Amino acid sequence: MGRDPHCKAENQEWSSDRRFDPSQRYADDVDLALVEDSDFDDAWTYVVCDEDEPCRACGRLAPHLDCLVIAVDGACRQNGKSTAVASIGVFVHGNSSHNSSRLLHKPKVTNQLAELWAGVEALQLAIRIRDEGMIEYPLGQAVIKADSEYFVRGMTEWIFKWERNGFRNSKGKPLENSFIGVPRSADACYKVEVLF
């Protein structure tokens, strides 16, 4: 398996094409369950090469050592009630010291808010990985893996409209679950392509 990165993230404005869809990136003969590689080392989960042929011996693709998968989740017990309690988690590998989970201490927590803040923490982790050189190669791509359609569509579709509207709804009121905490400027994500 190759050890060279070829993920070429450049300093670019966030575009609307930020959805990571393995079925659109990999050849038909690639098992989509294998587009992540968590066997290469004990700290990170890597995105595998979409321009490689599967190994004849094991059927796997080589990992991009500059492209990480960061999984996130948020949950809220008693969602929508004044007694609601929310928590968030960020996961990069089963054995990684960079995994985190915590209670979300915000007023009026909801499941959507928890999903958003888990995503914010993943973005902040990607920035730390880049800034502190935590992986062998400079971080070129981070795929933030979430099961929240609200978060994914928010980061790949809706955020551009929200930004134009000053994070306000059609009635001119601030969005209840705005993405204001998301560090999405070109400065924050300089030279890291972030996909969802």
Image (cartoon, rainbow, N blue to C red):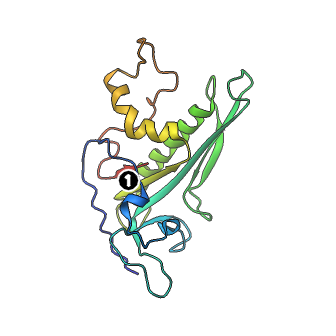
Q: Is residue 36 above or below residue 144?
A: below
User: Residue 185 location in percent, x, y?
Assistant: 32, 38
Q: Is residue 15 above or below residue 128?
A: above
Q: Residue at x 43, y 18 (%)?
A: 169
User: Residue 81 location in percent, x, y?
Assistant: 71, 22
Q: Residue at x 45, y 45 (%)?
A: 123
Q: Is residue 177 above or below residue 46?
A: above
User: Residue 179 location in percent, x, y?
Assistant: 45, 31
Residue 66, by quadrant, is: bottom left
Which residue is at the far front?
Answer: 28
Q: Residue at x 50, y 42 (%)?
A: 119
Left or right, 167 with reference to 13: right
**SS at circle 1:** helix
Q: Residues within 10 Å of mark 1 (few under 14, many from 20)?
A: few
Q: Identify residue type, mark 1.
A: Asp
Q: Residue at x 33, y 69 (%)?
A: 5
Where's the N terminus, which quadrant? bottom left
Which residue is at the far bottom?
Answer: 57
Query: In this view of the protein, which residue sits in the foreground, 122 or 138?
Result: 122
Q: Which residue is mark 1?
A: 131
Left or right, 149 with reference to 20: right
Query: In this view of the protein, which residue sits in the foreground, 169 or 92?
Result: 169
User: Residue 51 location in percent, x, y?
Assistant: 32, 71
Q: Is residue 135 above or below residue 29?
A: above
Residue 43, by quadrant, is: bottom right
Query: In this view of the protein, which residue sits in the foreground, 2 or 151?
Result: 151
